[in-house]
Image (tube, helix red, strand yellow):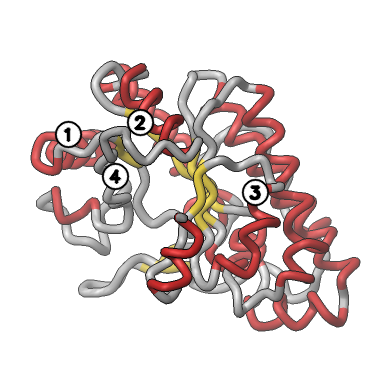
């Protein structure tokens, strides 16, 4: 791990506006642009992924890199959801596995499978090769976004109001699966970006986030802290300002303020 990058990032997170800004474009869904493999087929071959990441590192010269691609497909695919790969289209999950909120119907997986294992291996290679130069991150879906791949998203959002108990059951299942993945990265000294875009306001209100999502984020980030992961990003997006205080309670210490937030609101937050 590059100590200078980590030190500069921690100083920035602590509010030091005088340190040199870090260049972190956060490219993950565009990795195929650094490969000769078409976007709909990319993300399945170890050598291809490594070559793409190495090209990105050389050409972009970012201080940090995320070793990921179609992030919201990976966990659902490992559990049995097929991925659609049509020319000219980004890969997508064919459809949810669950027709009702009953995670007992889902498989119990104790170790990385399929592309979860592939991306873990690729990230470890990049970490070993470039970790002294830049900060290397793995990636994992957040529990609410993962739930929205296993169960129809629209029904999940409605069930937050009508069937909170069922939502909690599915969130517990997803959280345990994510914790297994986070542990695998953390044991290798690799920090993990938690992506949970389905939790973005206004899709989810601050009240629903606090009650149905935040406790599971806290569990995951508590694991990261226990694993000694100093940098803990949470990427949600949307109108993050409405849940910013809650996100800060999650245990994450790197948050996204999305482009949808008005500039004057951003300026006020940065004062």
Which is in the foreground here, disc 2 or disc 4?
Answer: 4
Q: Earlier in the sequence, mark 2 or mark 3?
A: 2
* Mark 2 and mark 3: Cα distance apart in space: 23 Å
Q: Earlier in the sequence, mark 2 or mark 4?
A: 4
Q: Secondary structure at mark 4?
A: loop
255 and 33: which one is in front? 255
Residue occupied by mark 2: 136
Q: Mark 1 and 3 residues: CB-CB less than 8 Å, in contact?
A: no
- For residue 24, the mark is 4
Q: Secondary structure at mark 3?
A: helix
Residue occupied by mark 1: 54
- Within 10 angstroms of label 3, few (less than 14), some, or many (20 or more) residues? some
* Mark 4 and mark 3: Cα distance apart in space: 21 Å
Q: Earlier in the sequence, mark 4 or mark 3?
A: 4
- Within 10 angstroms of label 2, few (less than 14), some, or many (20 or more) residues? many
205 and 91: which one is in front? 205
In the rendered image, residue 161, in percent from the top left (x then y), is placed at 83, 80
- For residue 248, the mark is 3
């Amino acid at each position: 791990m590059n100590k200078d990058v980590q030190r500069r990032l921690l100083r920035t997170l602590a509010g030091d506006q005088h340190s040199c800004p870090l260049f972190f474009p956060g490219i993950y869904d565009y990795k195929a642009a650094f490969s000769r493999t078409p976007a709909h087929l990319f993300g399945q071959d170890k050598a291809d992924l490594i070559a793409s990441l190495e090209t990105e590192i050389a050409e972009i010269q970012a201080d940090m890199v995320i070793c990921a691609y179609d992030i919201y497909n990976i966990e659902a695919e490992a559990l049995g959801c097929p991925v659609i790969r049509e020319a000219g289209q980004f890969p997508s999950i064919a459809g949810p596995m669950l027709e009702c909120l009953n995670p007992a119907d889902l498989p119990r997986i104790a170790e990385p499978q399929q592309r979860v294992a592939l991306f873990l291996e690729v990230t470890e290679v990049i970490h070993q090769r470039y970790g002294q130069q830049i900060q290397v991150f793995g990636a994992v879906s957040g529990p609410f976004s993962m739930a929205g791949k296993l169960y129809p998203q629209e029904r999940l959002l409605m069930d937050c109001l009508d069937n909170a108990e069922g939502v909690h059951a599915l969130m517990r299942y997803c959280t345990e699966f994510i914790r297994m993945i986070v542990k695998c990265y953390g044991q290798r000294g690799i920090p993990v970006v938690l992506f949970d875009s389905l939790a973005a306001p206004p899709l989810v209100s601050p009240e629903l986030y606090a009650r149905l999502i935040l406790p599971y984020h806290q569990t995951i980030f508590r694991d990261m802290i226990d694993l000694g992961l100093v940098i803990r990003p949470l990427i949600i997006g949307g109108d993050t300002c409405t849940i910013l205080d809650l996100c800060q309670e999650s245990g994450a210490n790197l948050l996204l303020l999305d482009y949808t937030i008005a500039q004057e609101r951003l300026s006020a937050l940065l004062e």
